[in-house]
Image: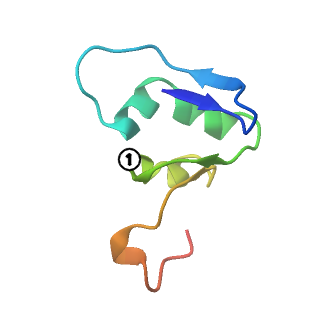
């Protein structure tokens, strides 16, 4: 997993791990969640594989709206 800014500069790189792993699990295991919740205020645009990280990082990870929340989405 690699995070870059809008200019393509690398901000975070995680180690490669053998086998398959869900995106959100890899983010948690690599320390990204802790880094985001304790670090500078940044916003990350992520795909649906990272849904749920926004609540764990103080809203710093932005993902597409969950299908069941397309209408009347909760405030969080």
Picture quadrant where residue 5 is located: top right
Q: Which residue is mark 1?
A: 49
Q: Residue at x 27, y 14 (%)?
A: 18
Residue at left 52%, top 47%? 46
In the picture shown, does residue 29 fall above or below 75? Answer: above
Q: Looking at the picture, how far across and down is residue 56, in whole percent?
A: 52, 48
Q: Residue 69's spot in the image, x, y percent?
A: 40, 76
Tell me what residue is drawn at x 41 percent, y 26 percent.
29
Nearest the viewer among 26 and 48 is 48
56 relative to 68, above or below: above
Percent position of residue 57, x then y: 58, 46
53 sits to left or right of 12: left
Where is residue 17, by image quadrant? top left
Is residue 7 placed above or below 29 in the rendered structure? below
Residue 21 in the image, given as x and y percentages of width and height: 28, 30
Quarter of the image with the C terminus is bottom right
Residue 21, relative to residue 68: is it above or below? above
Quarter where residue 12 is shown = top right
Residue visible at 73% across and 43% down in the picture: 42
Left or right: 29, with 5 as reference point = left
Q: Residue furthest front?
A: 7
Q: How many marks?
A: 1
Q: How is the image coloured?
A: rainbow
Q: Secondary structure at mark 1?
A: helix
* Label 1 Cα crowd, 10 Å radius (few <14 / some 14-19 / many 20+): few
| Outermost left residue | 19
């Amino acid at each position: 997993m690699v995070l870059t800014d809008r200019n393509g500069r690398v901000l975070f790189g995680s180690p490669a791990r053998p086998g398959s792993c869900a995106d959100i699990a890899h983010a948690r295991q690599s320390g990204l969640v802790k880094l985001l919740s304790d670090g500078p205020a940044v916003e990350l645009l992520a795909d649906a594989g990272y849904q749920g990280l926004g609540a764990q990082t103080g809203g710093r990870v932005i993902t597409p709206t969950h299908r069941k929340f397309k209408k009347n989405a909760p405030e969080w």
